[in-house]
Amino acid sequence: MALGRGAALTPIGEPLSTIATAKLSGPPHYAGFFSLARLLWPWRVAGIVLLGLLVAVFVGRRVRVEEGLVEDAPESYPDITIRAAKVYIFVAALLLLGHGFAPLVDRYLVRMPEAGLYWVNMISAVLDNATLASAEISPLMSLAKIKFLLIGLLVSGGMLIPGNIPNIICAGKLGITSREWAAIGVPLGLVLMLVYFVFLKIAAGSAGLFP
């Protein structure tokens, strides 16, 4: 879950951040390489630190020093190149999907309240958050709304294995089943969704009082 949060800070971290940056690269936001980092870093870093503390307190003492990961199979340069090409095609397809949804997004989602977007995006738990980002993000949205949207996607995306690419890779490498992931990811994700929502609303209220 911490990997998924850190990966969203730059366009090379995961498909969601690549798509979000590409869709916001034009006017009025002119998003660049570090735009998501500037927008999200306090929220992402806080989540990574919190998750790290939870692991240290509840899991760290049960891990033996000699335990570790072993690469299951060597990877050749052709394998790496093919995987990179597949990711590129995946991201390109999602960007085309986003352009197709643009008229609906600009007409309906742009007017949707931040809180509504945040909680609706809990479906990211079962649908890859990059797909939802490509379909939902619009340059017509304010940065405040984009922040609610992205944080909702990123937090709920950690609840189940299909939520984002890091989940799928980690589950495959470590042999984690969907049930095992959900037993921890769902309750923890729900708590984090509520905590983030409360602090986002507090921050939005403070920004309104002190623009």
Image: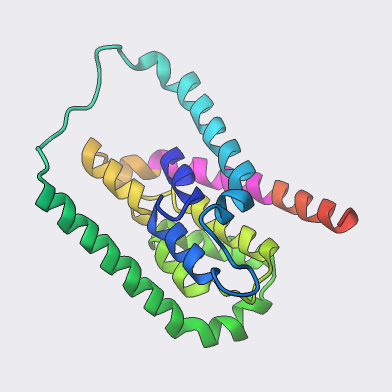
Foreground: 124 or 52?
Answer: 52
Q: Residue 38, image x and y in percent?
A: 62, 50
For the N terminus, the image quarter is: top left
Task: Report the residue at 10% width, 52% height from top.
Answer: 78
Q: Is residue 26 magenta?
A: no
Q: Is residue 189 left or right of residue 108?
A: left
Q: Residue 180, image x and y in percent?
A: 32, 40
Which secondary structure is most common in the magenta stretch? helix
Q: Residue 25, image x and y in percent?
A: 54, 69
Q: Which residues are magenta?
A: 183-197
Q: Is residue 43 above or below residue 153?
A: above
Task: Report the residue at 38% width, 61% height from top.
Answer: 128
Q: Is residue 77 left or right of residue 140?
A: left
Task: Report the residue at 12% width, 35% height from top.
Answer: 72
Foreground: 133 or 11?
Answer: 11
Q: Is residue 85 above or below residue 59?
A: below
